[in-house]
Image (spheres, helix red, strand yellow):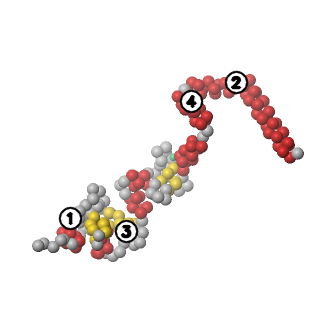
Amino acid sequence: MARRSTFMDKLSASMREANECWVWVGHKKPDGYGRLSINGRMKYAHRVAYEILVGPVPHGMELDHLCRNTSCVNPAHLEPVTHRENILRGVGMGGVNARKTHCKHGHEFTEDNTIILKSSGWRICAICEKVRAKRRNESPRAREQKRLYAQRPDIRERIRLYNQRPDVKARFAELARGYRAAKKQAKIGEIK
Ligand SMILES: [Zn+2]
Ligand SMILES: [Zn+2]
């Protein structure tokens, strides 16, 4: 009876020329990564290959496939990098986001203008975040007004012209004076 093939059997079967990708011949996940069970624990084939042929992966580091072939277990194509660096180099959403130089509204991702989410390494534009935060804190009345103005630019224009009329301006100034005086009066009342 044939014995079950070991990791080393599969590794030797996967091995090709030194500089070529060694495509894992064993079980692969849909994303291409070779997986195998060692003492009942699922492990990445490329990681095990690296540990056996090169040595332990430094603590907290991940192995990046320099060849961009996730099924490859050739240690020459693997480099230990930080999780953040791996995301930066990656081809997924995080990698695409990390390589962008500007946000979708055209603000540059400078050091000052970049918020990095600790959980995912995802970058956020600080200028846009400030705008969003302001919008979140807006009063329902202000939000309603903004929506109305967006739908009806004619109303916005009419109100703008109305506010520019000298009699309206004078009336507003009068109201503001009254408000300030009332506030002052209230303060004096407090002191007494
Ligand atoms: Zn490779
Ligand atoms: Zn922005």
Task: Between residue 88 and residue 176, name the one nearer to us.
Answer: 176
The correct choice, above or below, for 16 with respect to 167 in the image is below
Q: Residue at x 40, y 68 (%)?
A: 61
Q: Is residue 24 visible?
A: yes
Of the residues under marks 4 and 3, which one precedes in the sequence?
3
* Cα separation between marks 4 and 2: 20 Å
* Extreme-left residue of the structure: 1
Element type at mark 2: loop
* Residue that mark 2 sits on: 165
| Residue 25, numbered label | 1
Task: Between residue 143 and residue 173, name the one nearer to us.
Answer: 143
Q: Name the front one of labels 4 and 3.
A: 4
* Residue that mark 3 sits on: 80
Residues at circles 4 and 3 in contact by the CB criterion of under 8 Å: no
Element type at mark 4: helix
Badge 2 density bin: few <14, some 14–19, many ≥20, Cα 10 Å:
few
Q: Is residue 134 left or right of residue 34?
A: right
* Cα separation between marks 1 and 4: 63 Å
* Residue that mark 4 sits on: 149
Name which quarter of the figure residue 150 lies in. top right
Across and down, in percent, residue 145 comes to: 59, 32
Q: Is residue 189 left or right of residue 129?
A: right
